[in-house]
Amino acid sequence: MKLSFKTPAKINLGLHISHKREDGYHELETLLQMVSLYDSIELETLPSGIELLCDEPGIPKDHTNLVVQAAHLLLETCSLENKQGVRIRLDKKIPSGAGLGGGSGNAAGVLVGLNALWNLQLSRKKLTLLAAKLGADVPFFLTAPSALGKGRGDEVAPVQAVVKFDILLVYPGFPIATSWVYQNLNLKLTNPQNNISILKKFLSESQVGKLGKCLYNDLEPIVIQRYPEIQAIKEDLFNLGAKGSLLSGSGSTVFAIFDNPDCAKSAYTNLNKGNWEVFLTETVTCFSEFWPDEMLNYS
């Protein structure tokens, strides 16, 4: 049996870091939004074992890959070792190390896909608990296309977004290690005035222009200091009519919000001529845009 589906990228419309926790992680508040840049995954049942095939040479295919970890976690949780297996084919379009959550979305998709393919009938709550074991970003991809994240980012609550709007993603061609960014973060320089609730309000009301003016990311200054290309990309996007532009997560992707589709397309055409990878996307508003019906039948 086989099951094919897509998994989306995400951007952080806002990201505030308050303090470092006793467990070594940082306490944060973030507004997360899925966008229509997708990886493709095919799951095929095997008698036993886990096999990962990927078209991207730099992607690990062993236990260090989150999708392999997700499959192993389900086998262990449901006591299916040596009773069930899967071949995972992963077609990557989302750049790695880019602040777009590609690997986390892949892992979440594999959890839900195998839940359907193996007929495990695990609830959304159970799958979300498993997702949190894989990484702080993974539960978001099981929760809602727009969501508020707290704690490590794994305490996620849905946010209702009303209409779609255009998002331009610009990947400068190099990854940035999340660990490096957090190690160099000076919490004394973060802005306590940054307010996620304002962003949430404008997103829920589909006030794209006002949303764009309020974007913020406490990690952006340290990244720009080391990688001035990020600032250059932002300036180009504003010059091309963006309502707002920001580094996504720990980077390296910069995104821009547009309230006019023609303006977004023109910006894409202008920027898609150099060394940067540019993706013209839109916000995602429901899981049925990328998951088949059999993956949606869990509660």
Image (tube, rainbow, N blue to C red):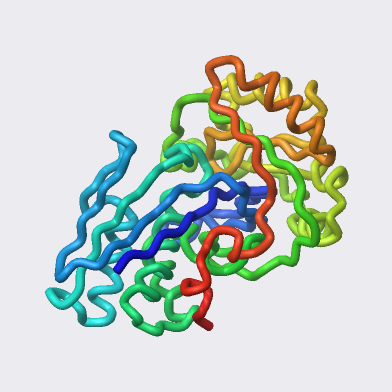
For image coordinates 48% across by 25% down, the residue present is: 173
Q: Residue 62 appears at what percent x and percent y?
A: 21, 50
- Asked if 248 appears above or below 27 in the picture, the reply is above
In the rendered structure, the answer to whether residue 118 lies left or right of residue 162 reads: left
Asked if residue 41 can be seen in this view, the reply is yes
Q: Position of residue 137 (x, y in %)?
A: 49, 57
Q: Which residue lies furthest to the front in this view?
A: 1
Can you say whether 288 is above or below 125 in the image? above
Camera-side residue of 33 and 56: 56
The image position of residue 41, as x and y in percent, is 39, 54
Residue at 75% x, 39% y is 257
Q: Tell me where residue 69 sits by quadrant.
A: bottom left
> In which image quadrant can residue 285 be found?
bottom right
Q: Where is residue 147 in the image (x, y as percent from the top left)?
A: 65, 63
Lateral position of residue 18 relative to residue 133, left or right: right
Q: Residue 240: which quarter of the image?
A: top right
Quarter of the rendering occupied by the N terminus: bottom left
Is 226 located above or below residue 77 in the figure? above
* Circle count: 0
Q: Which residue is drawn at 76% across and 52% down?
A: 164
Q: Which of 249 and 225 is in front in this view?
A: 249
Q: Residue at x 32, y 61 (%)?
A: 43
Q: Can residue 183 be seen in this view?
A: no
Query: Residue pushed farthest top?
Result: 274
